[in-house]
């Protein structure tokens, strides 16, 4: 660990915090229907889209109608994406002549991209045509991210509104999130990435002669546009198999830094949107502070573990830390920071192979995902996931003082607590349930690349990543098999949509309630006490749920390493 390394982490945090209120203010104006500096250009486009779609932008929806619209929209997205992959061999913009994707892999991939997971049991440059990458995958990257923003905004309206039966209009929220937020930033980010050296072309793959005289085919394509939304929308699916470790997906140290910022910036800004919409920005800063505490602790542990390496490396005289699986252009600190950022958000892009991290260094990405990826989290999804924990926290605080819990003027009663717990418990059901099946099902065990606790960690990471809608791969596991494709698809679908329904039910319940005036008995939710209690509840829930599994995997591997063992 070095001062230069810590300086990189501190600069990242400072820039992120500085951007939060700026972008948060802009997003608030967008979803309030107010005029922005882009309105003269985009407002006519927005109105035209409503006319074509038959949407009345002034007509709002009950939470049930809002949720049904979300589910119906994503069923359509699934069918479109699945069909594109199954017939891609007969479609244009396929210079490498990619054939149709196998049915089970197409199913897994379609579910993956509509759920904002982008888990990839395939290599992008060797499996998908340009048309599928653009019309199928990039298209869903925008829409799944915009859906997350829309759900978060609907839940915020539940807290901010009084005695109403509606939480907004999904089609309007989806359109505004895509048109005013995601698209303009992605255009700028794409241009920046092209400037940094990232390909953006529809031309054929390039043949080059190596120094030995052999022919090498270099894959190119419309890379920059997909990378921009994969980062900003916390999607993570790489154009290339090596993802952000590939020089065409991450050309420079500057592009690496900007991509990490892109992963976090909208998720952090949504906390500011919450504060503005409920009329107290300190509420948003308190939520961001809780996220920040968990993030800094995770970065510190991961950086420390990788910088110290392992006993085996130290015995070989390699005292510079664990560089196995790291991209040498970025080194240990940027790799550790990227790993924590991408798993604290539901992004899944990687610039180093997590399978090659030390046991404790690789445990931090696991924990980030197991907590529900609420440490900033996915675009929109991180905020509504954190608000579920906020509801549990104020409920616990209410039990302590013998008073009905309140949060931003709304009484938190049995219905909201039950819905929050239901949503929180869905993730461990998918993560631990499928892992338990996989480690005893013989065809699934055959896919494990390592024995012992490391092999267990590979399987646990796979289902944790998919259920949490992250999409990063630990590595070492052959995932493109019927079992992992089908089981993973179920984990991704349930992890996304079975969490959305309870969150929307909470939004509808809160919106119908009256606002309660603050009194001397109201538990303050903007100070350090609340932040500490919120962090404690998150860690206790996560610890009680996942500690046994972590003990079988990374913790057992670390203890074995101290005893001279390896896997």
Image (cartoon, grey):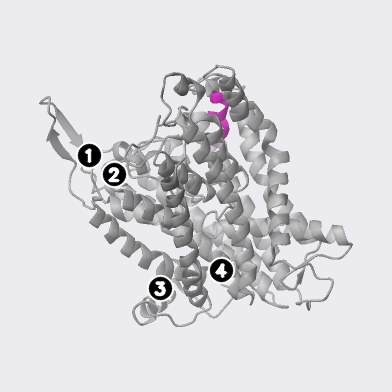
Q: Residues within 10 Å of mark 4 (few under 14, many from 20)?
A: many
Q: Disc 3 designates what residue?
A: 49
Q: Nearer the viewer, mark 1 or mark 4?
A: 4
Q: Could you tell me if the residues under marks 3 and 2 are in contact, i.e. CB atoms within 8 Å?
A: no
Quote the CA–CA distance across marks 1 and 4: 45 Å
Q: Which residues are magenta?
A: 454-462
The quarter of the picture where residue 207 lies is top left
Against 247, is 459 above or below? above
Which of the two discs, 3 and 2, labels the residue nearer the N terminus?
3
From where the camera sits, is residue 490 visible? no
Dot 3 or dot 4: first in sequence order is 3
Q: Are marks 1 and 2 in contact (CB under 8 Å)?
A: yes
Tag of residue 129: 2
- Please, is residue 371 above or below residue 447 in the view? below
The residue labelled by disc 1 is: 96
Sequence-wise, the earlier of marks 4 and 2 is 2
């Amino acid at each position: 660990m070095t001062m230069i390394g810590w300086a990189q982490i501190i600069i990242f945090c400072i820039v992120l915090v500085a951007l939060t209120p700026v972008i948060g203010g802009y997003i608030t104006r967008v979803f309030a229907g107010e005029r922005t500096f882009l309105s003269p250009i985009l407002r006519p486009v927005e109105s035209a889209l409503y006319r074509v779609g038959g949407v009345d932008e002034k007509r709002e929806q009950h939470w049930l109608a809002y949720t049904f619209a979300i589910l119906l929209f994503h069923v359509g997205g699934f069918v479109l994406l699945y069909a594109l992959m199954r017939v891609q061999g007969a479609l244009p913009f396929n210079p490498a002549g990619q054939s149709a994707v196998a049915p089970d892999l197409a199913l897994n991939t379609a579910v993956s991209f509509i759920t904002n997971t982008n888990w990839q049991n395939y290599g992008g440059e060797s499996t998908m045509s340009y048309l599928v990458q653009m019309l199928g995958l990039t298209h869903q990257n925008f829409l799944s991210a915009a859906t997350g923003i829309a759900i978060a905004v609907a839940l915020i309206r539940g807290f901010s509104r009084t005695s109403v039966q509606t939480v907004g209009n999904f089609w309007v929220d989806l359109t505004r999130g895509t048109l005013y937020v995601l698209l303009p930033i992605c255009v700028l980010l794409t241009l920046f990435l092209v400037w940094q050296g990232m390909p953006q072309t529809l031309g054929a793959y390039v043949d080059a002669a190596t120094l030995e005289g052999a022919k090498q085919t270099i894959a190119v394509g419309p890379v920059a546009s997909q990378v921009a939304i994969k980062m900003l929308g916390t999607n993570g699916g790489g154009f290339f198999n090596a993802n952000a470790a590939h020089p065409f997906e991450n050309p420079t140290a500057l592009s690496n830094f900007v991509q990490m910022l892109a992963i976090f910036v909208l998720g952090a800004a949504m906390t500011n949107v919450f504060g503005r919409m409920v009329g107290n920005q300190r509420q948003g800063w308190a939520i961001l502070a809780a996220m920040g505490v968990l993030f800094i602790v995770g970065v510190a542990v991961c950086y420390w573990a990788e910088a110290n390496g392992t006993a085996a490396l130290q015995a070989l005289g390699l005292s510079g830390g664990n560089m196995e699986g790291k991209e040498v252009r970025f080194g240990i600190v940027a790799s550790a920071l990227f790993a924590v950022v991408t798993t604290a958000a539901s992004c899944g892009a990687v610039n180093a192979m997590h399978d090659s991290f030390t046991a404790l260094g690789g445990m931090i990405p696991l924990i980030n995902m197991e907590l529900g990826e609420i440490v900033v989290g996915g675009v929109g999804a991180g905020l509504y996931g954190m608000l579920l924990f906020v509801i549990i926290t104020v409920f616990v605080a209410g039990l302590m003082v013998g008073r009905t819990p309140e949060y931003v003027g709304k009484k938190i009663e049995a219905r909201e607590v039950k819905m929050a717990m239901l949503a929180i418990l869905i993730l461990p059901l998918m993560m631990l349930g499928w892992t338990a099946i996989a480690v005893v099902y013989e065809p699934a065990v055959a896919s494990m690349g390592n024995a012992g606790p490391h092999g267990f960690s590979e399987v646990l990471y796979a289902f944790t990543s998919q259920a949490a809608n992250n999409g990063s791969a630990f590595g070492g596991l052959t995932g493109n098999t019927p079992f992992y494709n089908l089981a993973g698809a179920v984990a991704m679908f349930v992890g996304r949509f079975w969490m959305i329904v309870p969150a929307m039910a909470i939004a509808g319940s809160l919106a119908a309630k009256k606002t309660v005036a603050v009194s001397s008995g109201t538990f303050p939710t903007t100070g350090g006490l609340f932040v500490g209690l919120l962090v404690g509840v998150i860690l206790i829930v996560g610890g009680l749920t996942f500690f046994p599994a972590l003990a079988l995997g990374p913790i057992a591997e670390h203890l074995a390493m101290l005893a001279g063992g390896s896997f």
